[in-house]
Image (cartoon, rainbow, N blue to C red):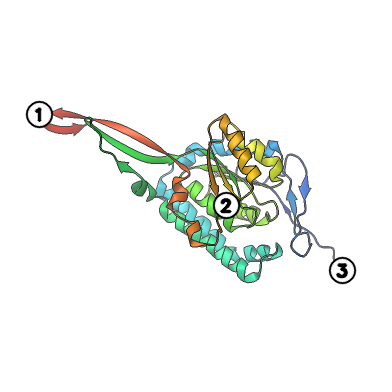
Amino acid sequence: MERLKILKTYKIYIGGKFPRTESGRYYTPLNSEGEAFGNICLSSRKDIRNAVVAARKAFGGWSERAAFNRGQILYRIGEMLEGRKSQFIEELVIQGVSTVDAKAEVELAIDRLVYYAGWCDKYHQVLGSVNPVASSHFNFSTHEAMGVVGIIADENTSLIGLVSIIAPTIASGNTCVVIASESKPIGAITFAEVLSTSDVPGGVVNIVTGSKEELIQPLVSHMDVNGLIYSGKDREIMKELNSASTSNLKRIRHYEHHWMEPKSQGLHFISDCTEVKTTWHPIENIGGASSSY
């Protein structure tokens, strides 16, 4: 007698915990062979609001951490992902990815985390500047985190598209609320399990699953979300982002990358998640010498 297959229930990730969706609903996506591979939470507007609250609560502590410490934490995420590499490969295969491609995707996701970990304590020096001014001032420009960033992850990849956006977003001190791929969601929730067992404080990364059609609007219209990142080609979604984001002038970043390519990582992904702050510091001339105060 054939044994009944037990599908895993993948919960959402909010504030460092794994609650069931407030709606109580779920869906069972199918792979290329028509087989269900999990029970996935069908999140609601309330879940989005809860995730934004958690992200805002975590923002102060995360953005104020030493940049070197943020780098240590991103590196630790990469270490934890390395330790569970075989599980991620297996789950990608379940979702219809070939074994060779799955192995390449997981290994690149690990390398990408290490790459951005290395930038954490360096991007300030590279992107910042001392500006020439006509008055007796020092003028400095530096890049600071935007705040809470809403991320609409790549629909066509389960892991690499997600990691490629989350890593630079949190490397610069932001916190985020992520809508995972609707058709390939289990890589996102298993990645949340990696986050929960690493050094990432609860609320820095929040991941919800479900229908993009239902979840995008409450995310982009939320007044406590400071920026939006969309990875995809759907022009209707782009139109909705541009329209709804005007409520509090959210910054929008749109990427149409093939995330396995080398050009899909770089310093510009970090700068896209920051705002430039300029500081004027007066100079007082005393006895012909210049001194700052």
Q: Counting other residues with Cα less than 10 Å from the Cα at mark 1, is it few (<14), some (14-19), or many (20 or more)?
A: few
Q: Are marks 2 and 1 in contact (CB under 8 Å)?
A: no
Residue under label 3:
2
Q: Are marks 3 and 2 in contact (CB under 8 Å)?
A: no
| Residue 163 visible somewhere in the drawing | yes
Q: Amino acid at mark 3?
A: Glu
Q: Is residue 107 above or below residue 227?
A: below
Residue 23 image-quadrant placement: top right
Q: Earlier in the sequence, mark 3 or mark 2?
A: 3
Q: Front-most of 18 and 269?
A: 269
Residue 1 image-quadrant placement: bottom right
Q: Is residue 278 left or right of residue 224?
A: left
* Residue 21 position in % (x across, y down): 72, 43
Residue 217 image-quadrant placement: top right
Q: Is residue 81 left or right of residue 31?
A: left
Residue under label 2:
195
Numbered disc 2: secondary structure: helix
Q: Earlier in the sequence, mark 3 or mark 1?
A: 3
Q: Amino acid at mark 2?
A: Leu
Q: Front-most of 202 and 103?
A: 103
Q: Looking at the rendered structure, which numbered label has been put on residue 287?
A: 1
Q: Are marks 3 and 1 in contact (CB under 8 Å)?
A: no
